[in-house]
Image: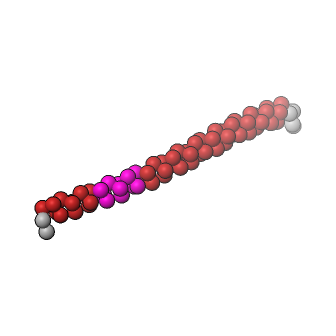
Amino acid sequence: MSSFEKLSEKIHTVLEKYTEAKQEKERIEAQMVKKEREVQEVKKRLERALKERDMVRIKLDGIIEKIDGLDIV
């Protein structure tokens, strides 16, 4: 095999690896976008749950106050 053929083969190998790396990068970036969306959704759900918890706490505090105000003997 001549030097030119060896060089040509090495260039071909480098180009193949570059293409594979580029595809892998795009795949990883797509996964990252998907995960970022999932994180945003989880944050929204957490925010809703915290608001719900606060509403329940307020209602329970009101109920407890009413019970404490009852004069049960």
Residue 52: image quadrant is top right
Q: Position of residue 55 (x, y in %)?
A: 73, 36
Magenta residues (range): 15-25
Say which residue appears at 67% left-offset and 40% top-offset. Answer: 48
Question: Does the segment drawn in magenta span residue 26?
Answer: no
Q: Position of residue 30 (x, y in %)?
A: 49, 50
Quarter of the image with the N terminus in it: bottom left
Say which residue appears at 35% left-offset and 56% top-offset. Answer: 19
Q: Nearer the viewer, residue 2 or 17?
A: 2
Residue 23: image quadrant is bottom left
Predominant SS along the magenta part:
helix
Q: Nearer the viewer, residue 23 or 70?
A: 23
Say which residue appears at 74% left-offset and 33% top-offset. Answer: 58
Quarter of the image with the C terminus in it: top right
Question: Does the segment drawn in magenta span residue 22?
Answer: yes
Q: Nearer the viewer, residue 59 or 3?
A: 3
Q: Is residue 3 left or right of residue 42?
A: left
Any part of residue 46 in sight: no
